[in-house]
Image (cartoon, rainbow, N blue to C red):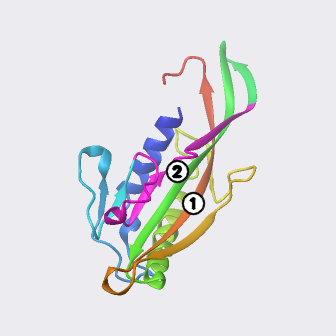
Amino acid sequence: MIYAIETHMLDVLQADATLYAGGSAWPAGWFGSVRTSEAAAPQAGWVNLFDGSYEPAGGDHRPAVYLGTEQIEAYDRLEQPTIAQGAWQELRIATIVLVVAAAAPSKQQARQQRDQLRANIRAILNRHIAEPGYWYDARMGEGGGQMQEQLRVTAVGSGAQRIAEASAILPVTVRYVWSSTAQA
């Protein structure tokens, strides 16, 4: 079910033009969005959506949204078991970890792009708190336990070769129902 939830979450983001819109942090915005799982190559100036984990060496893939990191992709835990309509049902809580990354020649520009993309994602997902067939409650920024929203910025190189990257780890807590009659 985690795969279905993650895939649908990226579908929701890709389908909304707000994802690549400009705003107060980064007025220019981007040209559109590209879903790399659809055999499309990542494109500079577009928001690249990856069905895989964050790639530190993917500077040409920025701005980008990834599903987790190499260390953690998602959490899933049982909240309440029950039997309904003759089937085992589980109310479950999953934490989907979105990683937002932006790159630019300066830390300030990278931070502005990251913050704009982060705000766009929050706005979109806050309009999809309930998604029939996927989740009945989604909340941004809280993952339970130690998983909280984290922001980072780094830079390497100097002069014309300088590249700064700003990233955000956005945990999305999703409550959903799993049934013994459900498909994978």
Q: Which mark is residue 69?
A: 2
Disc 2 to disc 1: CB gap under 8 Å: yes
Which residues are the magenta region? 51-79
Query: Residue drawn 52% across and 66% down?
Result: 123
Q: Quadrant of residue 21?
A: bottom left
In the image: residue 41, left or right of residue 80: left
In depth, the one of 184 and 36 nearer the eye is: 36
**Residue type for callout 2:** Thr
**Residue type for callout 1:** Ile
Farthest front residue in view: 157
Mark 1 falls on what kind of element? strand
Farthest bottom residue in view: 159
Instruction: Name the spot of residue 34 as percent of width and height, x first.
Output: 29, 57
Mark 2 falls on what kind of element? loop
Instruction: Name the spot of residue 157 as percent of width and height, x first.
Output: 40, 78
Q: Is residue 170 above or below residue 136?
A: below
Q: Quadrant of residue 62?
A: bottom left
Q: Is residue 123 above or below residue 178?
A: below
Instruction: Name the spot of residue 178 as percent of width and height, x first.
Output: 61, 27
- State yes or no: residue 76 in magenta: yes
Query: Residue drawn 30% across and 66% down?
Result: 46
- Crowding at dot 2, Cα within 10 Å, few <14 / some 14-19 / many 20+, comes out as some
Q: Is residue 124 visible?
A: no
Q: Is residue 178 above or below residue 83?
A: below
In depth, the one of 95 and 44 nearer the eye is: 44
Q: Residue tagged by mark 1?
A: 169
Instruction: Name the spot of residue 16 as percent of width and height, x first.
Output: 38, 60
In depth, the one of 116 and 85 nearer the eye is: 116
Cα separation, mark 2 vs mark 1, equals 9 Å
Work out whether mark 2 precedes mark 1 in sequence or the reverse, and give the earlier one. Answer: 2
- Crowding at dot 1, Cα within 10 Å, few <14 / some 14-19 / many 20+, comes out as many
